[in-house]
Image (cartoon, rainbow, N blue to C red):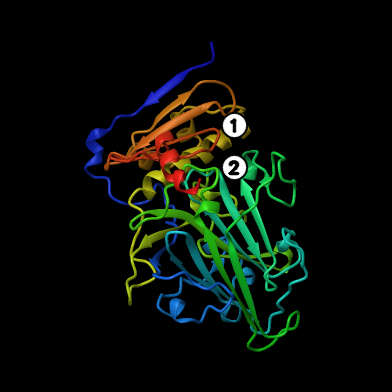
Amino acid sequence: MALAARWSLLLVACLSSVVLVVAGSWTEPRSYDAQRVEKPIEVDGDIYTAEWQAVPWSDDFVDIQGEDAPEANRPTAKTRTRMKMRWDDEFLYIAAEITAHDWPIIAKQTQRNSVIYSTDSDFEVFLDTEESNYNYKELEVNAKNIVWNLFLDKPYSDGGGEHSARVAKPGEPNYWEVHKQQTGAKLYGVMGQPTPEGRWTAEIALAHADSMDRTAAVKPAVGKFWRINFSRVEKKGNLNWVWSPQMLWSPSKHRPEGTVAMHYPDVWGYVHFIEAAPGAPASSWADPQWPLKAAASQLFFAEEQAVKEAGSAVELDALHAKNWIDFESLLKFQPELTISGPKTDWSAQLHDADGCTASIGGAHKLEVRCPGTLLGSVGRLLAEHSSFF
């Protein structure tokens, strides 16, 4: 019989004192309140139209490592990047402004589904519609409106791989392509030459049918959210500026650390869907379950460290002895850890004061259930996707 161990901490009395703070010192991901738009937006790269002027800009992009970034890697006023989002029943619309004052705008790729970031000035969108760390989508676009679309069954670090028209043909297991997506780009300046007022814009309509493909996602509705992040890549990947920095829990440093790796949906930002709200700020919402999710992610990275060093997941007291977790913060979420075999054969459940439960394990797949929801259920999957068939 496989090794089995169960460690359950039911500290109900502590729940009354739990407030919305992140586990450890996690930095909370950014969020953007995407306002509904009444009529479909014409996607042609012009982002200075009335539909876009009616909504606010996001926070400026920062280096992917956030506060841990070397000073030389951080964007300046001359390389400012920012975005806006809107939505309707069919599309998530995105407008991006990529400033390049005295900075060359490079767009060498001319074939669809080319590896754009390897050569070009690149704008990227990452979208996890089911918030599971699995089955997420990536779009890259350059200033010539050349795009590359990918579907990732799970992060590369967990054994996932690219599914796209670049690596496979229709009918092959690794083939994936969008069907209703719209994109546009406009250049303000001279391609390949730095100019004092250089910039380019990208306008994108991500079809919900494409974004939700092969997922158990909930279709956008007022009050719902998806996990999303954006990246601007320059100098063949040597510079990576993002909307929400990738602050992953580092067991060895006992804190969240800025990491040059986009393929960790755990810490992506949020697009929060709201009705049209003239004059509203870019963000007035925060995920009340973020502390729970941050705790689950912290536990995952701590156990991943244990597998690397000891060859197997270990009990919470062993993680605590190594100082790989913020033990006191984790206890607030009543962690229940089950180790059922070697290496990554473990699972855990954590609970917050709202009655929500986060499940995580060695496979890195996240599931969050809250009272009154059917998150992750087969019934929801069938109901939400029936309109697309």
Q: In what element is the residue under mark 1?
A: helix
Residue type, label 1: Val
Q: Position of residue 16 (x, y in %)?
A: 21, 42
Is residue 115 placed above or below 19 in the rendered structure?
Answer: below
Q: In what element is the residue under mark 2?
A: loop
Q: Nearer the viewer, residue 112 or 27?
A: 112
Q: Nearer the viewer, residue 365 or 346?
A: 365
Identify the residue at the far bottom of this view: 196
Residue 270 image-quadrant placement? bottom left
Identify the residue at the far front of this view: 389
**Residue drawn where x is 39% and y is 70% of the image:** 38
**Residue drawn where x is 70% and y is 73% of the image:** 144
**Residue drawn where x is 48% and y is 61% of the image:** 91
Q: Position of residue 265 (x, y in %)?
A: 53, 50
Callout 2 environment at 10 Å: few (<14), some (14 to 19), or many (20+)?
many
Residue pointed to by mark 2: 154
Residue 372 image-quadrant placement? top left
Residue 224 image-quadrant placement? bottom left
Q: Mark 2 or mark 1, which is nearer to you?
A: 2
Residue pointed to by mark 1: 307
Residue 12 visible somewhere in the drawing:
yes
In the visual, does 231 lie left or right of 275?
Answer: right
Q: Earlier in the sequence, mark 2 or mark 1?
A: 2
Whole-angstrom CA distance, mark 2 to mark 1, is 19 Å
**Residue drawn where x is 76% and y is 66% of the image:** 119
